[in-house]
Image: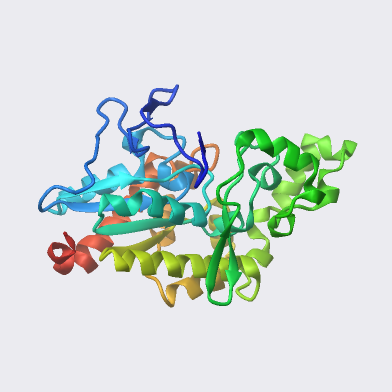
Amino acid sequence: MYDPYLGWKPKPNTRWPEGFSAYNSLCIRADPDAPVEYSLSPQNEMLRIVIIGDSFTDGDDVPFKDTWGYFLEKKLAEDGIKAEVLNLGVGSYGMDQAFLRWQRLGRDLNPDIVIMGLQMENTQRNVNLLKPVLQVNTGLSFSKARYILREDGLELINSPTLPPAKIPGILENMENWDLKTHEQFWVPENFQDRIWLKSKLIALVMEVFSPVEIDPFFYDISKEPARLTLRIIKKFKKEIKACQSCFLTVHMPITIDFIYAYLNREPVCSDMLAEIETDTEVIRTQDALLEEARQSSFFSLFMPHGHYSARGNEVIAKTIAQHISGNLRPNVSSLIK
């Protein structure tokens, strides 16, 4: 549903048509068979973890009990840590929207730990304003707010976001839109009516041989997209620390990252990821996923649309749980507010 602050968000108290997922009254993903309503303050002696990010965090394409948030709660319990994991992931979100969702809801939930699902290709979403311009065939006819760099920090533009009814008019008159210079993906010639652009075969070839996910421009730390992303993460961490919560990020590699790994090549985002690690704790999951792929198969980790399968999500959760149980266990009691 439309949200003037976030652009879009899940509808509260809804159940997916497939029946395997739902959202509670706070738009937190829930078990459709037993949706939990969370109070703003956690129970005594309960470690509260908020996870936030895009569809890989939300757990698209799998039932609630196959998401890494659900597995994380169970694996921490096995390690003797009483925890609850609140899933604030939303499909198609950029890191900026994840941060705004934290501001809008996450901090009110008083978490002890905040984990951001770090999808490196979302660096592109951070410089996008109109969803249909970034992804022409999207089912989301929404706009989003975005940050722009200022010497003294960040400035939020397109906030409140455009109501959906205004999007078609903006698209028809992009040259007259006062924010068009901040829409990274507005290239007029790409939207001209050309017969060859309608070919699904050509579109497939372009996607296979020149996928936007590996465009080095977006991961060059001297360019706006990467610089903006680094500053958003830094601001995110600062605000969470001010709330006396612990901030973690978990790197969530996609299929193309594994192709690079099999070819013994560094992914194009490696330098940027290393730059993030200079200031923020990143839980790396790729080695664990690769080990699982060797024991079973690469295809066991992903669903057809590219999101993690139940097995992939379980590996992610196990890696995070090991980090919390091993690295943070001595401080868990002090983290609980």
Q: Vertically, is 320 above or below 78?
A: below
Residue at image coords 25%, 54%: 110
Residue at image coords 32%, 58%: 114
- Please provide percent x and percent y for residue 267: 58, 65
Figure quadrant of the C terminus: bottom left
Query: Looking at the image, which residue sits at the far left?
Result: 44
Residue 83 can be seen in this image: yes
Residue 137 can be seen in this image: no
Colouring rule applied to residues: rainbow
Which one is nearer the viewer's eye here, 115 or 162?
Answer: 162
Which one is nearer the viewer's eye here, 97 or 303?
Answer: 97
Left or right of 173, for residue 110: left
- Please provide percent x and percent y for residue 209: 73, 52
Q: Count every numbered label the image shows and give the total.
A: 0
Q: Vertically, is 230 above or below 48?
A: below
Q: In the picture, residue 277 is in which quadrant?
A: bottom left
- Please provide percent x and percent y for residue 134: 67, 48
Q: Vertically, is 200 above or below 134?
A: above
